[in-house]
Image (cartoon, rainbow, N blue to C red):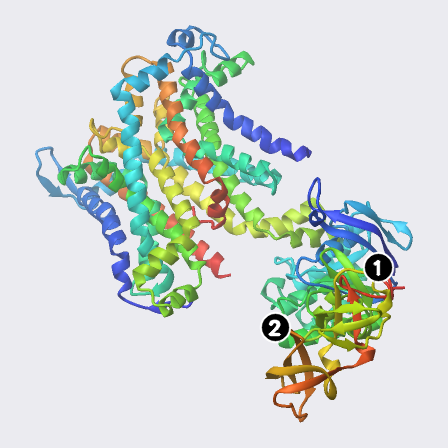
Amino acid sequence: MARITLDKLRHSYMETPAADADWALKQVDITWDDGGAYALLGPSGCGKTTLLNIISGLLRPSQGRILFDDRDVTAFAPDQRHIAQVFQFPVVYDTMTVYENLAFPLRNRGVDKATTDKRVREVADFIDMTHRLDERAKGLTADGKQKISLGRGLVRTDVNVIMFDEPLTVIDPHLKWELRSKLKELHQRVRLTMIYVTHDQTEALTFADKVVVMNEGEVVQIGTPVDLFERPQHTFVGHFIGSPGMNVLPCTVDNGTVYLGGDAVAVANDAAGAAGGSLEIGIRPEFVRFAESGLPAHVVKVSDAGRHRIVETRCADQTVRMLIAEGVEIPADGVQLAFDRANTRLYADGWMVGGNSVAGGAQ
Amino acid sequence: MNKTVNQKAWLFVLPVFILVAFNAIIPLMTVVNYSVQETFGDNTFFWSGVLWFTEVLQSERFHDSLVRQMIFTFSILAIEVPLGVAIALTMPRKGPWVPVCLVLMALPLLIPWNVVGAMWNIFALPDIGLLGYGLNALGFDYNFTRQIGDAWFTLILMDVWHWTSLVVLLAYAGLVSIPDAYYQAAKIDGAGAFAIFRYIQLPKMKRVLTIAVLLRFMDSFMVYTEAVVLTGGGPGNSTTLLSIDLVKIALGQFDLGPAAAMSIIYFLIILALSWVFYTLMMRNEES
Amino acid sequence: MKRTALVPALYIAFLMLPIYWLVSMSFKTTNEILGGFSLYPREFTLENYIVIFTDPTWYTGYINSLAYVSINTVLSVACALPAAYAFSRYRFIGDKHLFFWLLTNRMAPPAVFALPFFQLYSAVGLFDTHIAVALSHTLFNIPLAVWILEGFMSGVPKELDETAYVDGHSFWSFFLKIFIPTIAAGIGVACFFCFMFSWVELLLAKTLTAVEAKPIAATMTRTASTSGYELGLLAAAGTLTIVPGAFVIYFVRNYIAKGFALGRV
């Protein structure tokens, strides 16, 4: 077990980075609790795999330190950090049987035969591969191979952290569910620290206790799935999470009141604190509804998404999306929109006004 | 890929078929023709059946050439394959030096074979060649034009110089295709350098190595120009390999019958080995 | 630098040694060469090169060689393209056997064909022409080109063809404007290997030529045996034959790895 601290981490793949854009990781300061299940969520290129490889020791950071339980491991090689990593593409040793694959990490560390056998069978049982122990690893399907990759990480008793780099990418959809539940079960059983990198929000939100959202080399928000959904600290989080994402609408502030187009809008946070910069209102489609009076708009398009419908409206020269339950009548033309005040927030330069920055919610 | 059945595809293949058939079938028919006939030089031919074949197969000269050829081929295989793999393993996988390495290593492969022979001839001359002079200065009694051992040494060294790069480039291509994740996983699993070689690199190189071994096997069996320019088959006939002997008989002595019979036997040996090549490769691709 | 970098460095040094020797010889006078051993040219001279560039018997040799190699490369690749396409996309009677038969020709020992080719090409009146050598080399270059191109083409999904037809292209329009650019790397690799094997092969080239289309190789061997060892001249001629090869490798250096990766040399 370990608590992992990332201290002023910055990384660039270039020898002499000049501009901001040369840094893959701009500044990361996080602490991962011992035994927590974390998801590292973000779009492609946001730096999550870089961060993962720095934690596992496959990459040395340009600046900053990594601490495992207050011990500085920045200079340690991967096999000295007691970590396990499951990669995007299944890595198995083709020439060995399933048994030999699972036994490999133990044999390399000189563990005796009896202990090795015991551990291998325990892990094989957990991943449902006991009946295949004597088969050649080469002939397995993708999900079988990923299970073995996972198994190789579990077979060692000294593992502090298990890291997953988008492990379900090559798995068939109907098997993804099975593997995901296995991982959740694993976490509940063993209480290891687990860090799961993905760009799929469903995976992140179902797996993790806490989600770390990244964008362009920076951590944007850390919080529980509910936090991220209901209180996005950054418009990126609001937009990235949820389907469809949050509506982000440019607005103006005058004398402490927020105006959209010509109409005033009540917001949850304190608008007076907004200094300058580009100001936007963020509100999720779930929290917009039709009302007797409110912001004037007209309906542009209605899409049926099964259990609900997505209505696209045009309000104050902007597109506002709404989620309407089945059965609710949609007025023909001119409508009035009401924003649920508790879930409407003002953002300045993307950040929620008055909210805490990144580290809020991690400890 | 799902291929559709289409007999009209033969039209696409026709130019290739015609050209290769012209170059392969007609000459071969000539050779077969000569191999079963005897002539007394006056342009009349008599059917001689398997006479030439038995003569060649029983001739000591053919046996000797064949034995020399085997020694040569197996020697160079034993050196070039491990050496090539070793060099490929130590080459950088990424970075600015890679193209430099590849270009310099590929250079010997593009030198006309007679120039290779001539180059090594000049290089190994006992009094005025760098190698010859150097070896003699170091105390060895070296003269590849007079001493059989030295001739073989130089011949093999030349082939190693000439063709190891082929093995290197093939092995390197196989190595470079291994995704980083394998090395990363091995690091995390605590595998040492030898385990990485045995369980990751060697299995992934198996296909390219098969090709390399078989290619070198075939090509060394057919070697002619560079060997002939270097030693002329000598001293005496101590380095007369199969091709050299065949050309001596065919173009030198114009012994059509024996030359033709030997050609066919030679070609059959190669065909058998081609078949092995093809089967092994197809089996590798299917798995 | 890592210690293991020593190995490729030593190997490359080993490779460069005979080449250095050849080049340094080319800048020596024959007197200096025969007079004794010298590590580098004491009397640097360009005389050998001047002879080659001014004496027609020499420089025509290069022109001839380049001529038949170019003809062969163009011919081999042009014929191989449609054939490779057929092998890659279609099944037809005898396709597997045909493919295997083509491969066996790559394995054909030139020595076996020396005499028959001599008779064949004389019989059709093509003896001592560039075409003869170019045609004879297609024996092993076409199978090679087909093999390489088929590999690259199989990497392009059939859906590309189908999309092009749906978009209204005729077969040739699709083939020339869409397909060929897609496999440009493969064509490059095929051209490289055809050039390489034709440039270096000399038994057939010598057998099929006499005066008109005589390749540089023949000129070189003649010099060595007749005029008693004009080693400097020989060395200069040899050095010049390395130059086209070096050029070609330089241009395709990025594709070399790819071509070998396909494992289809």
* Residue located at (73% from left, 88% from top): A291
Per the rendering, the mark at residue A160 is 1
Task: Answer whether residue A303 is visible to the viewer in this image.
Answer: yes
Q: Which mark is first along the chain, 2 or 1?
A: 1
Task: Answer whether residue B265 is visible to the viewer in this image.
Answer: no
* Residue located at (44% from left, 45% from top): B214
Camera-side residue: B169 or A233?
A233
On the picture, is A333 further left or further right than B34?
right
Q: Given the image, what chain letter belongs to the residue carrying mark 2?
A: A
10 Å neighbourhood of mark 2: few (<14), some, or many (≥20)? few
Q: How far apart are the two marked residues, 1 and 2, measured between alpha carbons?
A: 29 Å
Residue C264, x across and y down, in percent: 43, 49
Residue B181, x across and y down, in percent: 66, 54
Q: Which residue is mark 2?
A: A172
The amino acid type, in three-letter code, at marker 1 is Asn
The number of numbered discs placed on residues in the rendered structure image is 2
Quadrant where the image shows the N terminus of chain C: top right
Residue C51, x across and y down, in percent: 31, 15
On the picture, is B3 further left or further right than B195?
left
Q: Is residue B77 above or below residue C102?
A: above
Query: Mark 2 and mark 1 in contact (Cβ < 8 Å)?
Result: no
Per the rendering, the mark at residue C21 is none
Camera-side residue: B154 or C188?
C188
Per the image, label 2 sits on a secondary structure element best described as: loop
Q: Quadrant of residue A251?
A: bottom right
Camera-side residue: A138 or A115?
A138
The amino acid type, in three-letter code, at marker 2 is Asp
Camera-side residue: A33 or B226?
A33
